[in-house]
Image (tube, rainbow, N blue to C red):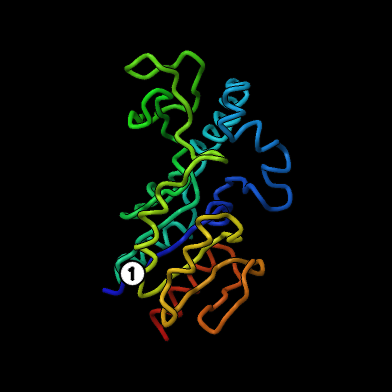
Amino acid sequence: MKKMVILTGAGMSAESGIKTFREMGGIWEQYDVTEVASPEGWRKHPQVVLDFYNQRRKQLFESKPNAGHYGLVELEKRFEVQIITQNVDDLHERAGSSKILHLHGELKKVRSTADASLIYEMDHWELKLGDTCEKGAQLRPHIVWFGEMVTAIEEAIPLAASAAIFVVIGTSLNVYPAASLLNYIPPHIPIYLIDPAEPAFRPSEQITHIKETASQGVQTLTQLLLNP
């Protein structure tokens, strides 16, 4: 089977009710990034940071995968599908996708502030001050904050380079290092972009732009690939 590598962003989960961050009306218009998504913000007022992520997590527990997520699962019947996601939700997992790499962390996981290797799955939405790891240290969201290294990019680069088909869904590609993955795709490999908006990069003959939402766009992509 051909290897299909799919990079997903906030638009992938928007139809599930998960608010996007960067678009008009998005989360970053309502919050100061440095206050709720940076190591400095965490040191300054951890309760504010916890409240912010608790609300995101509560929303996630109430959300469900959409047709786009399920459409990617269906593609696994015809392709070797590897998902690289900028999203911190678990909707790909809940839909049933089998290979998922999270670049920016996972909202339903928390980790120790003393030992980053101690990571725990949450079965509830609220993380509180005083919730500690087995070493007695405070737990924090398992999220890559602004100013922190996106270590998973080292795993994502060879995946992008190995793609026979590369798909981008629901991301403006304004966020680095995720956007840099396009630089590692061989020039002869077809790229499909699923997003209603115009891309942040210069289009080329290599790119087929499907100007649709994730749910409809995945359906269109499937038709294009299976009925060329």
Q: Residue at x 53, y 32 (%)?
A: 58
Please indicate whether residue 20 sits to the left or right of residue 223 in the image: right
At numbered mark 1, what does the secondary structure look like: helix, strand or loop?
loop
Q: Residue at x 47, y 13 (%)?
A: 130
Q: Position of residue 162 (x, y in %)?
A: 33, 69
The quadrant of the picture occupied by the N terminus is: bottom left
Q: Residue at x 67, y 42 (%)?
A: 27
- In the depicted view, which residue is nearer to us: 31 or 12? 31
66 above or below 115?
Answer: below
Q: Residue reaching furthest left? A: 1
Q: Position of residue 77 (x, y in %)?
A: 29, 67
Q: Position of residue 97 (x, y in %)?
A: 35, 55
220 above or below 214?
Answer: below
- In the depicted view, which residue is nearer to us: 131 or 221? 131
Q: Residue at x 35, y 63 (%)?
A: 159
Tell me which amino acid carries mark 1.
Answer: Ser
Quadrant of the image occupied by residue 71? bottom left
- Using a 10 Å C-alpha cutoff, classify the residue at mark 1 as few (fewer than 14 neighbours), some (14 to 19) or many (20 or more): some
User: Which residue, given by chain and number where applicable, does mark 1 sit on?
Assistant: 162
Q: How many marks?
A: 1
- In the depicted view, which residue is nearer to us: 197 or 135? 135
Q: Position of residue 204 (x, y in %)?
A: 57, 81
